[in-house]
Image: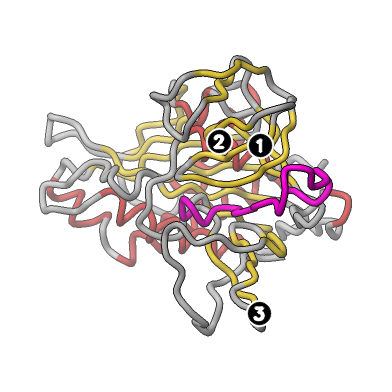
């Protein structure tokens, strides 16, 4: 089952503050009741449109509401949709609450006698209409394919987080998205269920990216970046992991990359990055060359390089899972 593509036909435009009934979820998309006669799909990480659910009354059954589950101990529940708002309560991982609304990057949730707000990057969501694929519902994987695997592809940075800017003016956020989209298409063609943390130029919090990997119980989380340093002579590509369960995948991907691209091989290393450190799933962060090196920037921003790099990453993922049949 591949990643959902953008709907072929635009049926309308929604604006901030409008509320719609959620009909279904599929990967990164939410189906809403657009008007009395039409339903449509919107990308789920567009702030106020994200999993928008509104109960008709405070007494509505929680079974009819989408819920959130806390994924970090000591999570703050607040009086408003801001990290500066007063803390109502601190709760631990595993607590579940019904959603009664969405405001900015926060869910409004129902407590016993009041509502509170919780950031969308510290929870996972679920619903009786949610269609997150279950492992036992997917077809058995055949050797040479990625059937039955769920892979999260993370395009680094986005929105007001530009990442680094190259000597020749390349913005990291733009080139990571191009690379991620190309990688996703290869993985999807091989049978993987691909979930992208972003599909456009938008900001997605780091913890939200990790929560997506947890929510989908991803078999692999691949974060794509391009490097930079003050020394413009430094060049090469590096693959990072943090936790022990991530090392084998990082090494396999790095080997795949080294067979397809001509950059200096800087090896596989441990890297204390949040998307690796806080990730329970197998996760790898790849730095695909230095934008701070003018000659390397010229090489790594070409369509040819992206094709070869994503082919190498794909081959590494395929080799890893073929060698580690579960």
- In the picture, the disc for residue 97 is none
Write down the quadrant of residue 213 in the picture.
top right
At horizontal 53% and vertical 73% (from top left) the residue drawn is 6
Give coordinates of residue 110: x percent, y percent: 68, 34
Q: Residues within 10 Å of mark 2 (few under 14, many from 20)?
A: many
Provide residue 44's location: percent of width, then percent of height. Answer: 55, 56
- Residue under label 3: 36
Nearest the eye: 45 or 145: 45
Image height of 95 relative to 35, above or below? above
Which quadrant of the figure contains the C terminus?
Answer: top right
* Residue at 62% across, 32% down: 115
Tell me the distance, in whole angstroms, between the alpha carbons under discs 2 and 1: 6 Å
Which callout, 1 or 3, points at the residue further toward the start of the chain? 3
On residue 210, the disc is: 2
Residue plotted at (45% across, 74% down): 13
Q: Which label sits on residue 214? A: 1
Q: Position of residue 93 (x, y in %)?
A: 69, 22
Could you give the CA–CA distance between mark 3 and mark 2, rounded to whole angstroms?
A: 36 Å
């Amino acid at each position: 089952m591949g990643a959902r593509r953008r709907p072929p036909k635009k049926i309308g435009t929604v604006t901030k503050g409008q509320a719609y009934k959620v009909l279904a979820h599929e990967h990164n998309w939410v189906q809403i009741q657009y008007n009395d006669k039409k339903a449509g799909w919107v990308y789920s990480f567009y702030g106020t449109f994200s999993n928008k659910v509104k109960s008709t009354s405070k007494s509505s059954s929680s079974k009819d509401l989408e819920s959130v589950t806390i994924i970090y101990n000591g999570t703050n529940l607040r009086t408003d949709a801001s990290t500066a708002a007063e803390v109502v309560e601190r709760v631990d991982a595993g607590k579940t609450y019904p959603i009664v609304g969405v405001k900015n990057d926060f869910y409004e949730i129902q407590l016993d006698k009041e509502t509170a707000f919780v950031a969308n990057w510290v929870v996972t969501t679920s619903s009786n209409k949610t269609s997150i694929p279950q492992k036992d519902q997917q077809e058995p994987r055949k050797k040479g394919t990625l059937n039955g695997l769920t892979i999260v592809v993370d395009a680094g940075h986005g929105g007001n987080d530009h990442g680094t800017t190259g000597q020749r003016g390349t913005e990291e956020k733009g080139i990571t998205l191009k690379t991620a989209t190309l990688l996703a298409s290869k993985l999807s063609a091989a049978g993987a269920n691909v979930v992208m943390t972003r599909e456009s130029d938008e900001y997605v919090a780091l913890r939200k990216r990790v929560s997506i990997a947890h929510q989908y119980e991803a078999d692999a989380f691949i974060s794509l970046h391009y490097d930079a340093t003050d020394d413009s002579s430094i060049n090469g590509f590096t693959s990072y992991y943090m936790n022990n369960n991530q090392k084998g995948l990082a090494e396999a991907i790095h080997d795949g990359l080294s067979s397809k691209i001509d950059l200096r091989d800087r090896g596989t290393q441990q890297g204390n990055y949040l998307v690796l450190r806080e990730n329970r799933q197998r996760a790898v962060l790849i730095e695909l060359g230095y934008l701070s090196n003018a000659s390397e920037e010229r090489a790594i921003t070409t369509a040819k390089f992206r094709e070869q790099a994503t082919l190498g990453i794909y081959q590494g993922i395929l080799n890893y899972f073929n060698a580690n049949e579960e």
